[in-house]
Structure formats: structure tokens, C-alpha cells
Amino acid sequence: MVARRAGTVSAATLFGLVLSLVFTDLVAPRWVQAVGLDVWNIGTLRDEVRGHDEQAAIVEAQRIRIIREAEASGRVAERLAAGKISLAAAVDELEPTLRHRVGFECAWPNDRPPTFRHAVARYAITRVEADLTPDPERQAVVVARLLAEYADLR
């Protein structure tokens, strides 16, 4: 019974000491560091967490931008597939967005298009082709039309 009580008192004392150090670090972090009691480097960990939060916000903003760009590209591809706009008009709409997309120029490493406009046109054709996969007959007709327009693209 005595040993059990001593263990309980020791655990309570240790818990109280740790709680006191954490509370003191929250109230007076510079003093804790100056005295050398910041054994967990809480200040450094706080800075790391802040940095990770900032990086997470940047990644989230990029994710949202890419989703919006993909949605916009999808709307252009729908109009292109329906014949409401020409391939050249679709390229004009997509080019400003894709010019700033990191890695876009690496999409065709073995068969590089002659110009950036041609790369955007290939992207548009590929997007339409993928969207029309459930309807192979329509896909063949639309893609043939787009490839003919691609041949005349300047």
C-alpha cells in the first residue's frame, strides 16, 4: 500500500511538473528558452507548424486553381465537341491558362508539337477524345474534324 501511494505521488508530481513547464512556456516562452527549460523545443516546433500551415494553404490554393482550370477546360472541350467553336478558337481560350501550367510543356516528350499553340490544340483534342469515349462513333467523327483543323492550325 505504501509503495502504491509513493508511485501515485511520484506520477502526480511528474505530471504537475510537466504541466507547469508547458503552461510556463505558453505564458513566457522567451524566459523558458533563456533559462534552458524548453526541453521539447516548443518554440521551434511552433515555428515548424506555422510553416507547415503556410505550405498547406499554398497547396490548397494550387489545388483549387487546378480544379477551376480543369472545369474551364471541360467547358471549352464541350463546346469544341459540339462544333460550337473551332479548334483555333478553343486554343485562343485555353492558351493563357496553359501557358502558366507547370509541366505542361512536358506532356509530349517524344513527339513535341512544333509550337505552343499546337501543344494546346493537342491538349484540346485529347480532352475531347477522352470526354467522348462512351460514344465511339461520335468520337471518331469529332476527332477526325479536329485533326483536320489541327493540320491547318497556324
Image (cartoon, grey):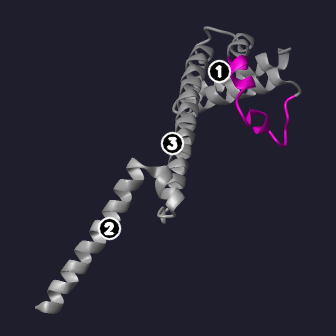
Label 1 close to label 2 by CB (< 8 Å): no
**Residue visible at 22% across and 84% down?**
7
Kindly report which numbered mark, 3 or 2, lies closer to the viewer in this rendering: 2
Q: Residues within 10 Å of mark 1 (few under 14, many from 20)?
A: many
Q: Which mark is residue 142?
A: 1
Select label 1 or label 3 by which is in front.
Answer: 3
Does residue 115 show up?
Answer: yes
153 to the left or right of 92: right
Residue 45 relative to residue 110: left or right:
left
Q: If the image is split into quadrants, where does the N terminus sit?
A: bottom left
Does 111 appear above or below 147? below
- Distance between the alpha carbons at the discs numbered 1 and 2: 74 Å
Stretch of the chain drawn in magenta: 94-113
Q: Earlier in the sequence, mark 1 or mark 3?
A: 3
Q: Which residue is mark 3?
A: 53
At x 52% / y 29%, what residue is drawn? 64
- In magenta stretch: residue 42: no
Q: Amino acid at mark 1?
A: Val
Q: Earlier in the sequence, mark 3 or mark 2?
A: 2
Q: Quadrant of residue 141?
A: top right
Q: Which amino acid, by three-letter code, is at mark 3?
A: Asp
The x and y percentages for residue 145 are: 71, 18
